[in-house]
Image: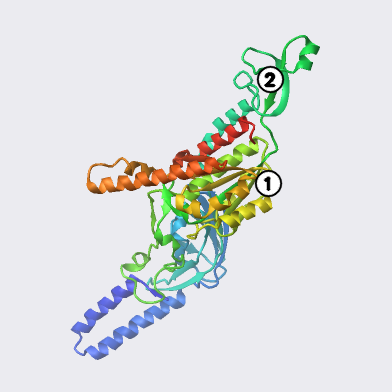
Amino acid sequence: MALTGRAALLALLGTLVVLFAPRPGPAVAGVALLLAALVAVDLLLAGGVRPLRFTRSGDRLVRLGETATVDLIVENPGRRRVRGLLRDAWPPSAGAAPRRFALDVPAGERRRLTLTLTPVRRGDREAAAVTVRSLGPLGIAARQGSHRVPWSVRVLPPFLSRKHLPAKLTRLRELEGAHPSMVRGQGTEFDSLREYVPGDDVRSIDWRATARRSDVVVRTWRPERDRRVLIVLDTGRTSAGRVGTAPVPLAGREDRSSAGRGAGLGGPSGVLPGGLSGGLPGGRGGAETAPGWPRLDWSMDAALLLAALAARAGDRVDFMAHDRSVRAWVSGAGRTELLSSLVNAMAPIEAELVEADAADMVAAVLARARRRCLVVLLTDLNAASLEEGLLPVLPQLSSRHLVLLAAASDPQVAAMAAGRGTPELVYDAAAAERQGADRRRITARLRRQGVEVVDAAPEQLAPALADAYLALKAAGRL
């Protein structure tokens, strides 16, 4: 049960009657009885909320930054009209709008209510509860009840770097010999024969074909196909740091609170100040624009671009997410379903505030990749973390596989290194310079162990990683 502003107004008028009554005691009792009778009659004549039936339909998947539509169908099998308000509660990060609906469902009929979701966070967003407040004909009191109407929308990574894919595919076609006038003889897999032109490597001359044709003929090569690429995503604590500029709004702290909080249309009973509509808590939660995107999301974006490019190149792409154990594994996906499998696997993954177990990660890679392949580690170039975790076990991995480590740098650190105006800025600059030196030192150590390293600004990580992959293809190392 819920009381509206009209009930509060009637109670206020009743106090005026009591003030001017010669005998306040009987006046108070009379006003209270009258108000109770009106509330009871209004509740008795209000349509029931328990018999209502609810079904949902709409989108199940949406990319971060885009909108999804979910329909809620309300059916009234009762004998009385249900008139009032309805609130469909979702987590704050789901970005549901509108949060409240005016409801008017005659007996035996149904109504369709459309909700728009604009999520600000990856993962699964599940509906909490549907709360209905059915007003009586006097508008004094209302019946109220909540129903569980399950529905889940999975918010996928946005894959913002797909804008770079056409340029990278053009470069790939050049490497494969689609434009031999631009790129000649790269790769190590035999493609075809053609006439010699000045500038060709004489080591590519096919002497037997030259003798048969009485003209100098050279072999052309293309990058190898059907190679294996294993992308390993670090989901440990270093991947939680926010860097760069968030391309889409991120959820605020209130997102982690229960979506059921404030799911009702008000308290279970009692006066709602400001009338019925004013007494409805918005429950909008906190979605705010964060100063940066987590490293994990930048790494996911780079992984998607690399996977799309490698699949087009004819390579087999597998994916693993790991911190203390394997969090996700995608293997054997065909070219057409690869990206769909990857984004579905990535969507619910969040960074864990634990130190990644590099030894377990290497063991998991070696167990899953027995033949030589390209292992791409998407992590952070944190010197202390790598020296204690990855470097001691890296030889086990680099001796059997070609390893490429990619990391997003923090542009804010580079900006701090230029500060000189005040003593505080100088100290900040010194700390930034030291971090930069540590980063360069650990990069040099990795390269001495045969590891390819990509260290780029967050917005450039995806295209830089794709370029590194193409360079390995062109050099015949993959």
Identity of the residue drawn at 64% across and 26% down: 186
Instruction: From this view, report whether residue 232 is shown above or below residue 447.
Output: below
- Closer-to-camera residue (62/170): 170
Q: Which residue is mark 2?
A: 203
Q: Which residue is mark 1?
A: 333
Mark 2 residue element: helix
Closer to the camera: disc 1 or disc 2?
A: 2
> Crowdedness of circle 1 by 10 Å Cα count: few (<14), some, many (20+)?
some
Measure the C-alpha gap from mark 1 to mark 2.
39 Å
**Residue at the outermost right position:** 212
Q: Which mark is residue 183?
A: none
Percent across and percent down for residue 233 are 56, 50
Q: Earlier in the sequence, mark 1 or mark 2?
A: 2
Instruction: Look at label 2 and name its amino acid.
Output: Arg
- Closer-to-camera residue (405/16): 405
Percent across and percent down for residue 93 are 45, 57
Q: Quadrant of the N terminus?
A: bottom left
**Would residue 245 be seen by someone viewing this image from the given angle?**
no
